[in-house]
Amino acid sequence: MKDGSFQILLFEDNAADAFLVRMALDEAGLPFQLEVCSDGEAALQQVELIEAGEASRPDALLLDMNLPKFGGREILERMRQGAIGASILVIILTSSDSPRDRERAAALGVEYYFQKPADLAQFMRIGEVVRTVLVQTAG
């Protein structure tokens, strides 16, 4: 937490979903600063900057598994290899409900797996999910 707000990274290629995530975090009353990377290449560059100490360590990463250029699983695998990346709280945001994807995410230490619903009200739950996970890990 920096300046009283949580630093959250969002790796998401869908601008509408990124907007909804921001809205959900606002509605949850979570003080946050959100940085968005819209493709896997930008996401990997951000991970490298964090590992090199050139970017601040986020309190949480919200990761879409289906990113262009590099997929979420590859980003997560590379991130978990680093000393800093290994300890970052990760919440998966994905349209996939594949048991295999869930197992892979769990094996890589993901704190929560959130399947993106088609329903707006259900999608907005992500704000409370992020709030709950951050409070549990901070406390």
Image (cartoon, rainbow, N blue to C red):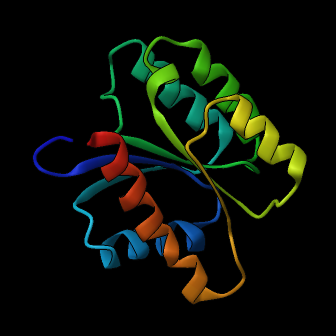
Is residue 72 placed above or below 45 in the rendered structure? below
Is residue 105 placed above or below 113 in the rendered structure? above
**Residue situated furthest left in the rendering:** 3
Instruction: Compare residues 73 and 46 and report the one nearer the observer.
Output: 73
Q: Describe residue 50's horizontal placement relative to residue 94 as left or right.
A: left
Specify whether residue 39 is in view: yes
Residue beneath the point at 50% across and 79% down: 124
Is residue 90 placed above or below 48 in the rendered structure? below
Specify whether residue 70 is in view: no
- Rendering coords of residue 18 (x, y %): 52, 65
- Which quarter of the picture shows residue 115? bottom right
Q: Describe residue 35's horizontal placement relative to residue 82 as left or right.
A: left
Residue beneath the point at 41% across and 22% down: 50
Quadrant (top left, top right, bottom left, bottom right) of the N terminus: top left
Instruction: Compare residues 36 and 85 and report the one nearer the observer.
Output: 85
Residue beneath the point at 78% across and 47% down: 102
Residue beneath the point at 67% across and 39% down: 40
Is residue 12 placed above or below 60 in the rendered structure? below
Instruction: Compare residues 5 and 56 and report the one nearer the observer.
Output: 5
Q: Describe residue 13's horizontal placement relative to residue 53 as left or right.
A: right
- Rendering coords of residue 131 (x, y %): 36, 60
Instruction: Compare residues 55 and 137 and report the one nearer the observer.
Output: 137
Quadrant (top left, top right, bottom left, bottom right) of the C terminus: top left
- Rendering coords of residue 132 (x, y %): 39, 59
Q: Describe residue 135's horizontal placement relative to residue 14 as left or right.
A: left
Q: How many marks?
A: 0
- Which quarter of the picture shows residue 9? top left
